[in-house]
Amino acid sequence: MGEIRAARVVPLLRRFGPLLVVVAMFLSSVLVAQYQKAPPDFGGSYSFPTPTHPEPRGTWVRALDVAMLAAGLGIGAWLVLKRRSRNGVLLLSVASVAYFGFYRKGCTCPIGAIQNVTATLVDPSYTISFGVIAFFFLPLAATLLFGRVFCGGVCPLGAVQDLVLVKPVKVPVGLDRVLQWLPYVYLGFAVLFAGWGLHVLVGGWPIDVGRRFIICEWDPFVALFRVSGAFHMLAIGGGFILAGMFVGRPYCRWLCPYGGILALLSRVAWKNVRITPDKEVDCGLCADACPFGAIKDLRADRGHCLACARCYDSCPYEIERRGGPSAEVQIARLVRP
Amino acid sequence: MIERSTRRQFIDRTCRLAGFVTLGGAAGLLARRASASAVYQVDPLKCTSCDLCRTSCVLSLSAVKAVNDFAKCGYCMLCPAYMDVTSMPDEKGVPAGRVCPQDALKRRVVGTVDPDDPNNNYYEYVIDEARCDGCGKCVKACLPPAGNGSLRLEIRYDRCVECNECAIQTACPDQAIVRVDVPGLSPKGHDVTHG
Amino acid sequence: MDPSPSDTPPLSLRERFFKSWFPPAAVVGGVATLVIAALRVRPEPRSPSPAPAGEPAPAITPPAPLERQYALVATIGGHALSAFRESLLDVGADHSGQVVALGDGHVRVFTAGGENLRQWRAFDGAECLAVGPDGRVYVGGAGRVDVFDGAGQRAGGFSFGDAGKPASVSAVAVHGADILVADASARLIRRFDASGRQLGLIGDRGKTKTFMLPNGKLDVDIDAAGVVRATDSGRHQVTAWALDGTPIGRFGKFGMRDPADFVGCCNPINVATTPDGKVVTSEKMVARVKVFEPDGRLLAVIGTEHFDPMCTQIPLAVDPTGRILAADPVRRLIRAFDLSAPGVTREEPR
């Protein structure tokens, strides 16, 4: 019986919740200071203006965001694994930058959702919303199924870096290996700050920081998406864009904490970008084409492949599949002195 | 030539299954007590109009605006939030200084104008939200005993980008920005007035 | 023979197109957006239009020596036995100099020195009181007036108006058989007889109909000659009326410098009359009590050191000896002031 009543009340509260807050606060302040029991008699014709309280985004908008995320993941998986189309992934990246980036101003994002999930697990009184849960878990599930298709065309931060990549420079393998640990360090700090904050004594100096969402505070591209922000945020964003012109996706590979989690999940993914050994001729063109160093020993490094589909464009067998000259002819041309 | 051994495939499959189970379990656990949405709002009983709303918002022009509660407003001609009552009066005897640095508080005469006392009318005060930057000077000036306390600061949702972590909440020294959850599945939910 | 460019695997037109200009365009677009964002950082405050920031007015000029000086002689309510724990709403004085106060939901009677004599419960919503010449206590609030005898027994009363939407009664005054009720909702003074029959209205005639009450409070008092004094706080004036509602006059204006003027947006907030016909007013924001001649000439100022600066009301009463009683609702004290020789203070202000 109580459930039926709740079922009627909850949708109502869901719809009018934030407005109720405003009204409740207004009412409570009325009770505190009893003033103005009757409005003045203005004479003439005057009607009190109805105060406007713009509503926050409705539930349906948040549901739309989740639907768009799911659609992006699905389309991305199809484009990378079935169509193998670099152009398709490129267009998907542009669409993601436009929708999740500039339209939604980069918020909510799965990277930031790490903090919400941590906070609510540590402190059950911190509630998490359905949209944030979906944003956190959907890309993880998609990665377990199809690899890092989220990184490939859906994540707006990754898409920005991917779009500005003009002249990729190969990063030394040793350096790359060391830097690949940074995302986990960042993840550790993010979880620490999101769950508990930091209360320590360092050499006699106390550090007292409450719960903070450092991923959100140091998001490099959020100032770009909002087209406003503090100077240091704009500088960081500009720096990453400049770096991203020459180094493939520096944030994604060496900083993104969510990417660190995805790297682990992608290694056991059900379907992934693979270099099939039965047709493999080890020409190495895909390894040259991959700007992220994800093709190691001429095999795809499943954890670090960012599903950008650039390798397909350079593979002779893929070109043959699309209607170009046969693979043997292409390779013969390559090796001709 | 098979790329991976069956043992490797077995490990992969097991990890994958474990991954799905963990994700599904965690998602379900969280969904049971999830809210439908969460927004931030200013608690007028705690706010002290300290000016940090103006500078802390991630937007260049803060999403916090002053709002006039017309039921409480006195519609005074000599509004202490509109004019600086201690400044030099002009030739009509009305103080010439203005409280709002952005000139965002606008007024217009309402009701019948008394022909014998044309200076003393009722005025309707509204805030021009395109100019208001949430500094709170008018809110402070309207507090009792000088005024009726009808002005308050409010986060306006047509401008707020609904950040995951409200930067103003981080900066506010009075804990006056509260996180408001709209209840989700759980009927016990959360009291909407306490974030 | 070097492999000619045409021998490398041909790229399709689309691939060349996307590889050539799209990334640099994205870079340019991103940098441009950041530049736009940088330009939108924190707009400079625009100078307000058209009035300037305004120079601060010169300090309040020291007044010419005033005719009268008042000294604090007693404070009621600060002691444990006479403390008001939650509220202090109004004060009155009866013919023998006893102090009657409305606070904590009760009517309390004190000696002039502050000893608690007796008390009785007032009705819910009681806001104001007046003491009649026969010692009866008239308590008003929420659309009704209750009458009590000196011992606290209910001796009558009436209500008026719509019971569903009770009028805000912010003050009561008594003259002979007439009971004046300040109806702040209608912004008028209603004149009733003891049975509750309305005899007339005060304040609806004259050039400015009804009172301007931005803070929703109207105070009224009547002197021995039957002249009704009422606060018109929105107009910064003290108004005078005959009992039948004929306007007699008004004095006062807004001003922040001249001590005879009323400060802020809505003052004076309370008014009382003395047995010798002088007018006593109180103000908020600059919490002080002033005494005027009936024509508006300033006689005395009782300064802000006696009152809490957060007071939004300072209810006033004058006892038959001319002692001024002023209630401080924030500190929940009643101050008693007597005429004194200049410079003499008989009790330290608390």
Image (cartoon, coloured by chain):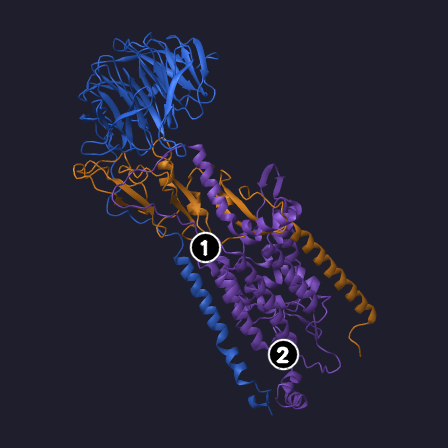
| Residue pointed to by mark 1 | A229
Q: Mark 1: give few (<14), some (14-19) or many (20+) Cα within 10 Å.
A: many
Residue C164 percent across, percent down from the top left = 41, 34
The kind of residue on which mark 1 rests is Gly
> Disc 2 designates what residue?
A83
Image vertical order of residue B31 relative to residue C135, above or below? below
Q: Are marks 2 and 1 on the same chain?
A: yes
Query: Does the image show residue B166?
Result: no
Q: Colour of chain A?
A: purple
How far from the left and from the top, in percent, is residue C239? 22, 26
In terms of depth relative to the viewer, which is nearer, A145 or A327?
A145
Tag on residue B102? none
In the figure, the shade used to draw chain B is orange
Choose between A81 and C15: the one closer to the eye: A81
Q: Which quadrant is home to the C terminus of chain A?
A: bottom right
| Residue, far right | B7
Provide residue A316's location: percent of width, then percent of height: 65, 84
* Res. C3 image quadrant: bottom right
> Residue A101 versus residue A23: which sits nearer the camera?
A23
Say left or right for A318 vs B180: right
Residue found at x 58% / y 71%: A169
Q: How many numbered tags mark residues here?
A: 2
Q: Colour of chain C?
A: blue
Choose mark 2 or mark 1, whichever is in front.
2
Q: Secondary structure at mark 2?
A: helix
